[in-house]
Image (cartoon, rainbow, N blue to C red):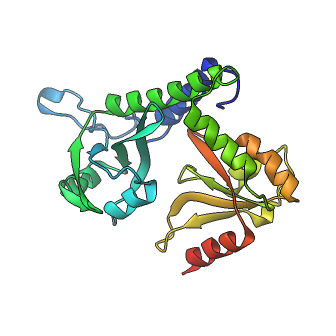
Amino acid sequence: MLGRGGVSDGYEVGSKRQRMMESNPYFAVSSSAGGFQPYGYGGVYQPPPFPVVRLRGLPFNCTDIDIFKFFAGLDIVDVLLVNKNGRFSGEAFVVFAGSVQVDFALRRDRQNMGRRYVEVFRCKRQDYYNAVAAEVNYEGIYDNDYQGSPPPSRAKRFSDKDQMEYTEILKMRGLPFSVTKSDIAEFFAEFKLIEERIHIACRPDGKATGEAYVEFASAEEAKKAMSKDKMTIGSRYVELFPSTPGEARRAESRSRQ
């Protein structure tokens, strides 16, 4: 997890994400003798290309959901928004369920997102891995320096959250799209979470949005749980925000539509 432990925590998260990539069929090519293995000319083994594309020219207020909409109808496994020095760079990596999905994604090259046209082009698996490592290292370096002099923008964000009015509800953002209620319950294991009041937000087609709403025993307990802000579930760091019962009900209603 990305805690106060410094750069070593960043490496721990990186290794977790690496293990996830190696164990997930979308992130690694099996070399087992029993599985299907494509061969090229001369019987030389040719692993299928890693199903990832790179996006450039995205609006600076772009979110994961905007990318899902941009690639509507395609099966997305992971979205990584690229940040540089803590700011969104206008670039992203999108991993799909297979090579055919990538071919369809490339047809969206130069299409608009809002008022900006977006470039969609092929890239290598290592490019994606490097972007993941850069994200983890930036968070780890920040946490190592936190008690000295944190970057103003980040410090301000923590301050703003601390000054907000709390209810018993927190909003989670940046969750893995495969997250379960059990994963969330384990994430908040040391706090008084009402497990039957965990709501994972979904789009109308039933796919997860990467957001969730959770209810605690009290507003005070919810505020304590904010200590988990920017820690990880699986391979992704999760942002937490104070929310309200009304906002949670609206999200739940949208998921049922």
Residue furthest out toward the left = 41
Q: Is residue 108 above or below residue 57?
A: below
Total numbered labels placed on residues in the image: 0
Q: Is residue 155 above or below residue 143?
A: below
Q: Is residue 127 above or below residue 65?
A: above
Measured from the top left, where is residue 250 in percent x and y? 63, 75
Q: Does residue 26 appear anywhere in the picture?
A: no
Of residues 44 and 92, the one drawn nearer to the viewer in this rendering: 92
Q: Quadrant of residue 232?
A: top right
Q: Nearer the viewer, residue 22 or 113?
A: 113
In the image, taking residue 181 as reference, residue 55 lies left or right, namely left
Residue 120 left/right relative to 13 = left
Decide which of 234, 121 is in the foreground and name it: 121
For image coordinates 68% across by 75% down, the residue present is 249
Nearer the observer, 146 or 180: 146
Residue in the picture at 54% in, 81% down: 257
In which quadrant of the rendered view does residue 193 lie?
bottom right
Farthest bottom residue in view: 257
Q: Is 2 placed above or below 93 here?
A: above
Name the residue located 17 percent from the left edge and 28 percent from the top edge. Answer: 43
Residue 254 x %, y %: 56, 76
Horizontal side, residue 129 vs residue 7: left or right: left
The x, y position of residue 129, in whole percent, is 40, 30
**The N terminus: image quadrant:** top right
Q: Is residue 57 visible?
A: yes
Residue 192, image x and y in percent? 87, 53
